[in-house]
Image (spheres, rainbow, N blue to C red):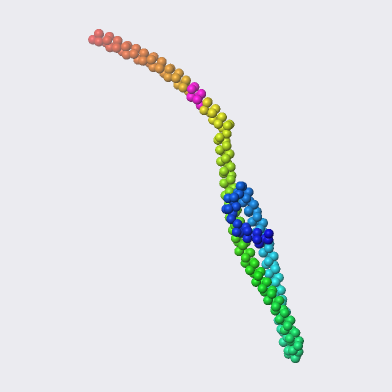
Amino acid sequence: MSIFNRLSDIINSNISSLLDKAENPEKMIRMVIQEMEETLVEVRSGTAKVIAEKKTLARRAEQLKKQAQDWESKAELALSKGREDLAKAALLEKSNINSSVEITERDLAKLDGTLDKLSTEIEQLQAKLNDARARQKTIVMRTTATQSRLNVNRQLHSYSIDNAMDKFEYYEKKIDQMEGQMDSIHIEKRGLQSEFDELEKQESIDQELEELKTKLKHQ
């Protein structure tokens, strides 16, 4: 496949469609970017060669035009000396050279068209490459995030995590039972203390009552 056909294929390709069909989008877009970069290097190298060829043809055209002018001057000189035969021969040489000039200028026009087309396609390829690179960053980030989620999901549903959580629940229940026993003992102690406090309070009231009775007797 020629570089120009490959360039057109890449420019006309649909990156989104390629990625949708790919089993591994990250790998696919790496390949697409590599292909684009390699093609861009080749196209720019080819463009440089076309530009060099154009300069060579342009110099050739200028040289031919100078030769044509020289033959015209020679024809004028021949006529001035009365040598019409030499003048005709000089004009014939000029005509042949002008034919070469026309061919060279047509070639130059074709090269200009090729360069214009290459310039447009290089811009299109560069735009596609920029788009692919931007998508690559997004795909890499999404792939990394998705992989992280998968890893977390596997951990959440793994036997070791479930087993550890079961142990946590078991120990929490044991601690609840121990705390319940301690609260029960504390309540019992508080109940017993309350009874003693009530006895002491009752004794204090009885003593105060006796003192009041004694006081009334002596009035």
Q: Seen in the image, is 86 located left or right of residue 129?
A: right
Give 14 or 154, whichever is nearer the viewer: 14
Specify the principal SS of the magenta part.
helix
Location of residue 55 by image quarter: bottom right
Q: Which quarter of the figure is the N terminus placed in?
A: bottom right
Vertical arrangement, residue 169 with respect to residue 199, above or below: below
Residue furthest to the left in view is 219
For the C terminus, give its image quadrant.
top left
Query: Height in image: 37 above or below 193?
Result: below
Confirm whether residue 143 shows in the render: yes
| Image coordinates for residue 115, horizontal then vertical, percent | 64, 66
Residue 58: image location, x then y, percent: 69, 72
> Which residue is the extreme one toward the bottom?
82
Q: Is residue 66 visible?
A: no
> In the image, is residue 196 above or below residue 63?
above
Residue positioned 28% across, 12% down in the render:
212
- Residue 13's quadrant in the figure? bottom right
Residue drawn 36% across the image and 13% down it: 199
Highlighted range, magenta: 172-178
Q: Position of residue 104 (x, y in %)?
A: 69, 74
Foreground residue among 84 and 2: 2
